[in-house]
Image: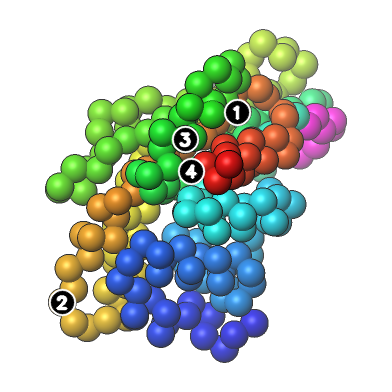
Amino acid sequence: MSELNDNKEGWKNARTFGDILYLYLEFLKGEYSTTATYDGKLNDDTIKDLETIRKLNEMYFLTLDSQDGLINSTYNIFIKQYEKVIDKYTLKQRAYVDGYIHKNFIEVVTDYFDKSEDIIIIMGDISDDGKTSQLRSRRIPVTLEYVGYDDDQGEVFTRVGITNHYKEQITEWIQKYNTNKLNLSSIFEDVIPITFIDMKWGRQGYLTDMIYKALKSQFK
């Protein structure tokens, strides 16, 4: 592990989207323990799928948030938020990947998934003022929790959709290490925020593999 846990020099010199991709790849390789949008140890989902996630970033898709599919039931478990032992607790997850993709790849990716019945793509254009389009309001449940044996009464625990807060986090991180006044708007001018969601609950290792195949198809 580098002594520079947050790669201060790298972020100080970042000026392009390619620079940001490189810095995140260094983070995913374990060279640094902190980055603009993440602090600490990688979660288990990312570690399990790390090789494919690295490949996505190498193909100009900056991945910033993701989870894999999961269906898991635990019995007679103490749940802290309920402050009691639950006879059955079930967690269901849909896989999703959230980040920024270069505009040149949008047509290839959307065409690849055009006939897919279970993978949806949510995209938003970034306007001049840095705001995301109205598609931001569309948020899909990706995590459900069930308390007890009634599998029809799941509570939504997490939703995802288009969000642009990563842009602000990344530009603030660059400015954090650079005292000069910089015009950083060009970093995101050729990319758009995008979210891929596998609508099938519990499916593991499928979504990131399909995104990789979609990006790779442009080179045929």
Q: Nearer the viewer, mark 3 or mark 4?
A: 3
Instruction: Give amino acid for label 4.
Output: Asp
Q: Residue at x 48, y 70 (%)?
A: 23
* Residue identified by numbered label 4: 98
34 over 50 or under it: above or below: below
Which residue shows up at 66% across the image and 22% down it?
200
Label 1 secondary element: strand
Q: Quadrant of residue 85?
A: top right
Q: Is residue 116 visible?
A: yes
Q: Residue at x 68, y 56 (%)?
A: 50
Q: Nearer the viewer, residue 3 or 197?
A: 197
Residue corresponding to mark 3: 108
Give the CA distance from mark 2 to mark 4. 29 Å
> Secondary structure under badge 4?
strand
Query: For mark 3, does the 10 Å Cα neighbourhood hold few (<14), some (14 to 19), or many (20 or more) residues?
Result: some
Indicate the amino acid at tag 2. Lys
Write down the region rendered in magenta. Answer: 72-79
Give the label on residue 198, or none. Answer: 1
